[in-house]
Image (cartoon, rainbow, N blue to C red):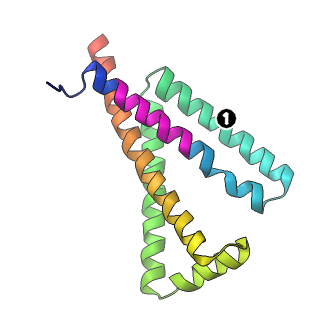
């Protein structure tokens, strides 16, 4: 019988969060390596690695909830802004122009740019869902310990 938030279920959530965290960390900053001067890219990657390390330590190792709450709020705002941008581009009939411009800047095809853009949005949603689950699990484990 499967019990919600049993030990197995908690570890399942923690493992899936770690997978989504690794994917986000490996894919979020790649564009910096291609489109920015090298010194600026190194500085931004260092800052990103620092925040990634803090998120891993407080969210996963320490089983914290406060830092994960901030991550959830920031990611939710980011996703809302992204969806508003997409809706604006669709209704103003500028989505094609935007993707073609982005494709010409990157040197990739419009289909590749669109696929990568949608993959990024999907990964952000996936990471947000698992961060929400991890926060609930961390909160329950803290309550159980008290």
Q: Position of residue 71 (x, y in %)?
A: 48, 42
Q: Is residue 48 left or right of residue 38?
A: left
Q: Is residue 97 above or below residue 143?
A: below
Q: Is residue 16 above or below residue 129?
A: above
Q: Which residue appears at 36% of the width and 24% of the height?
A: 11
The quarter of the image holding the C terminus is top left
Residue bearing the label numbered 1 = 50
Q: Residue 122 lies in what quarter of the image?
A: bottom left
Q: Is residue 138 above or below residue 40?
A: above
Range of magenta residues? 11-23
98 or 51, which lies in front? Answer: 98
Q: How many marks?
A: 1
Q: Is residue 50 left or right of residue 11?
A: right
Q: Is residue 140 visible?
A: no
| Prevailing SS of the magenta stretch | helix
Q: Position of residue 27 (x, y in %)?
A: 61, 50
59 or 122, which lies in front? Answer: 122
Q: Is residue 63 visible?
A: yes
Q: Residue furthest top?
A: 146
Q: Is residue 93 left or right of residue 109?
A: left
Crowd tier of the residue under label 1, counting other residues whose Cα lies within 10 Å: few below 14, some 14–19, many 20 or above: few
Q: Is residue 14 magenta?
A: yes
Q: Which residue appears at 51% of the width and 81% of the height?
A: 95
Q: Which residue appears at 48% of the width and 33% of the height?
A: 18
Q: Residue furthest bottom?
A: 93
Q: Which residue appears at 48% of the width and 29% of the height?
A: 59
Q: Position of residue 140 (x, y in %)?
A: 28, 23
């Amino acid at each position: 019988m499967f019990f919600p938030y049993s030990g197995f279920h908690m570890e399942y959530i923690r493992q899936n969060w770690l997978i989504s965290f690794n994917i986000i960390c490996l894919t979020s900053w790649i564009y910096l390596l291609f489109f920015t001067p090298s010194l600026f890219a190194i500085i931004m990657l260092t800052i990103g690695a620092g925040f990634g390390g803090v998120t891993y330590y407080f969210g996963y190792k320490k089983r914290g909830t406060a830092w994960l709450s901030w991550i959830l709020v920031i990611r939710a705002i980011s996703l809302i802004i992204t969806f508003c941008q997409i809706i604006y581009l669709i209704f103003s009939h500028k989505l094609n122009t935007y993707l073609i411009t982005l494709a010409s800047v990157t040197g990739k095809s419009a289909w590749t740019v669109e696929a990568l853009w949608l993959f990024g949005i999907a990964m952000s949603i996936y990471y947000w869902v698992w961060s929400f689950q991890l926060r609930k699990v961390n909160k329950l484990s803290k309550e159980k310990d008290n």
